[in-house]
């Protein structure tokens, strides 16, 4: 039973990380209808930037975090402004392939600047102790991960529900032509979505980096982001969160109970097997957007 | 206030849709634009509001001036900021949002303060009391009439000085058409909003119009004051289906082929 609870908690923590990465995909898809294939690259660049300010430049912690946020926002803005805006009005496939190129661009450039050696976040972040509640040992970073991811998700929901730029985003997500017609600046909405997207990956990067170190392998988590987004229905925030949790928990359980039988590779394979069977049951994901049709 | 001077519009650089359209909307007046399908009415409105480019259209000749400033070639956002808003054809509500969110969406562009926004919304509810009752309902589930009111209200939220209405009566019951047109007339009288109304429903549009234009094949073929157009034999015959005496036409005595349009189309 103790193992089960332990696995459950680590599954939730990992699941929320996947959910954040998936939300980065969903936000962009909803507003711009571009399937964002760049999560891997964005996660890498965000992680290395976070590391750079913390360790390489030895900034004080709050300054380093603010600098990382600013740099990530700048990257998000730059991606939209430089690469995607010229493609507005062109076939959507061009934009999608472009996001794929962004992935490899960041994969290459992080390798170029920081090399292939794995990097570690400082001890206050990466070396958190394990806390024991009774006999259940939980790494403290996972608790922080659950708290901060949940807060981020709530903040994101509140942003969409209650702020004007959030409303502008929902309007654009629903009908670009109407949004233009109402005098909403859609180019700003587009760059906002990309900024939010990269910021989500920054938060993901802090936790993933703390749990497994920073290396070129991180972009695999980003790929999970795409999978989770697809599983959740691509247009739905709750869907992405549910799908993230499902995959996280399944992975943790498989890792805890089945690796002895089936070998370690099953942990990375399980989500894809799940995805495979899901596509029989609900090809449009857990929660696609409800289409309103009056009768 | 708004002057279209001999404009020509092409789609994708080849398809010539408007040729030499000249229209004037004087301040505080209601001008209506009539014509059959494909005459170029909607294109004219889109040319004014800057909404041609999603369809790869362009004003290739002539000029559109608003209070003496050329607005052809400006982005929609700039035009909305200047006080021109187009109510698009076909009840384009934002279906997933609530009615009130739809209204707020209409005001985002000019970024009002909270107090202003509240006041503006209350004013819309005053004009469209029905919307107040359904304010928290998802817009996609509203009835056709409510949706149309919502879309007009949303346009008003940008505090326009000139409103372009594209087939507002389309698909509504005659009662609702009357109701909407009453409100439109009130907007013109009370809020001093000038209106350019595109309609298939010639009678409804001409009744409230100070001036009217008839379009055919991308050009203006007839223009006159509202009441005189209502009296015009050709308009009666071709747009209202009345005989020369003013009675409803019967299929028994139909002799459509005998009357020729007395304008150059």
Image (cartoon, rainbow, N blue to C red):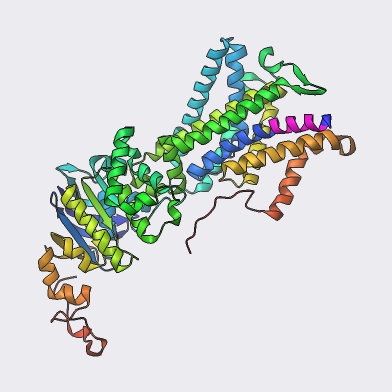
Residue A148 percent coordinates (x, y): 61, 26
Whether residue A10 is in magenta: the answer is: yes
Question: Quarter-wise, where is residue B258 in the image?
Answer: bottom left
Would residue B10 be seen by someone viewing this image from the given angle? Answer: yes
Would residue B75 be seen by someone viewing this image from the given angle? Answer: no
Residue B208 relative to residue B101: left or right? left
Report the front residue among A145 and A26.
A145
Residue lying furthest right: A261
Question: Quarter-wise, where is residue A257 in the image?
Answer: top right
Question: Quarter-wise, where is residue B92 in the image?
Answer: bottom left
Residue A147 percent coordinates (x, y): 63, 26
Residue depicted at x 38% and y 61%: B144
Give the prevailing secondary structure in the magenta stretch.
Answer: helix
Residue depicted at x 48% and y 37%: A160
* Numbered range of the magenta stretch: A4-14
Give the position of the N terminus of chain A as an image quadrant: top right
Residue A195 sits above or below residue B242 on the image: above
Residue depicted at x 14% and y 42%: B68
Residue A164 relative to residue A98: left or right? left
Residue B246 percent coordinates (x, y): 15, 79
Report the front residue among B20 and A23.
A23
């Amino acid at each position: 039973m103790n193992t089960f609870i332990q696995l459950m908690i680590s599954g939730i923590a990992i699941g929320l990380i996947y959910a954040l990465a998936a939300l980065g995909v969903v936000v962009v898809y909803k507003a711009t209808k571009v399937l964002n294939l760049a999560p891997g690259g964005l996660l890498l660049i965000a992680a290395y930037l976070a590391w750079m300010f913390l360790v390489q430049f030895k900034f004080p912690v709050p300054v380093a975090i603010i600098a990382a946020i600013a740099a990530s926002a700048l990257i998000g803005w730059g991606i939209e402004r430089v690469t995607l805006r010229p493609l507005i009005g062109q076939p959507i496939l061009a934009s999608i392939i472009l996001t794929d190129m962004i992935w490899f661009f960041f994969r290459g450039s992080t390798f170029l600047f920081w090399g292939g050696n794995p990097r570690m976040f400082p001890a206050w972040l990466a070396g958190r102790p394990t806390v024991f509640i009774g006999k259940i040992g939980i790494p403290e970073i996972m608790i922080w991960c659950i708290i901060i991811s949940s807060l981020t998700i709530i903040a994101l929901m509140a942003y969409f529900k209650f702020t004007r730029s959030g409303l502008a985003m929902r309007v654009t997500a629903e009908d670009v032509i109407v949004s233009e017609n109402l005098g909403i600046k859609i180019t700003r909405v587009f760059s906002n979505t990309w900024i939010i997207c990269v910021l989500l990956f920054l938060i993901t990067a802090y936790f993933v980096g703390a749990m497994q170190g920073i290396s070129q392998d991180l972009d695999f988590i980003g790929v999970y982001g795409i999978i989770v987004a697809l599983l959740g229905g691509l247009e739905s925030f709750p869907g992405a969160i549910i799908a993230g949790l499902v995959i996280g928990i399944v992975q943790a359980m498989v890792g805890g109970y089945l690796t002895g039988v089936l070998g370690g590779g099953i942990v990375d394979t399980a989500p894809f097997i799940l995805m495979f069977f899901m596509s029989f049951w609900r090809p449009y994901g857990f929660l696609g957007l409800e289409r309103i049709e009056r009768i | 206030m708004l002057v279209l001077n001999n404009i020509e519009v092409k789609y994708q650089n080849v398809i010539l849709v408007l040729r030499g359209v000249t229209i004037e909307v004087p301040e505080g007046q209601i001008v209506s634009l009539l014509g059959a399908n494909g005459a170029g009415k909607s294109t004219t409105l889109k040319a004014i509001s800057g909404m041609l480019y999603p369809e790869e259209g362009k004003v290739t000749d002539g000029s559109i001036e608003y209070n003496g400033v050329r607005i052809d070639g400006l982005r929609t956002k700039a035009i909305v900021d200047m006080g021109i808003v187009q109510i698009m054809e076909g009840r384009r509500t934002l279906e997933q949002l609530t009615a009130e969110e739809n209204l707020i969406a209409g005001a985002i562009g000019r970024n009002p303060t909270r107090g202003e926004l509240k006041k503006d919304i209350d004013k819309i509810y005053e004009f469209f009391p029905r919307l107040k009752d359904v304010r928290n309902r998802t817009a996609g589930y509203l009835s056709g009439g409510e949706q149309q009111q919502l879309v007009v209200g949303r346009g008003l939220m940008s505090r326009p000085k000139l409103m372009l209405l594209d087939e507002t009566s389309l698909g509504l019951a005659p009662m609702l058409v009357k109701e909407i047109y009453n409100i439109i007339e009130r907007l013109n009288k009370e809020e001093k909003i000038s209106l350019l109304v595109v309609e298939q429903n010639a009678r409804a549009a001409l009744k409230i119009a100070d001036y009217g234009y008839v379009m055919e094949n991308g050009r203006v073929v007839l223009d006159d004051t509202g009441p005189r157009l209502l009296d015009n034999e050709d308009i009666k015959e071709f747009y209202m289906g009345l005989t020369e005496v003013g009675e409803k036409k019967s299929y028994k005595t139909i002799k459509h082929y005998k009357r020729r349009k007395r304008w150059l189309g």
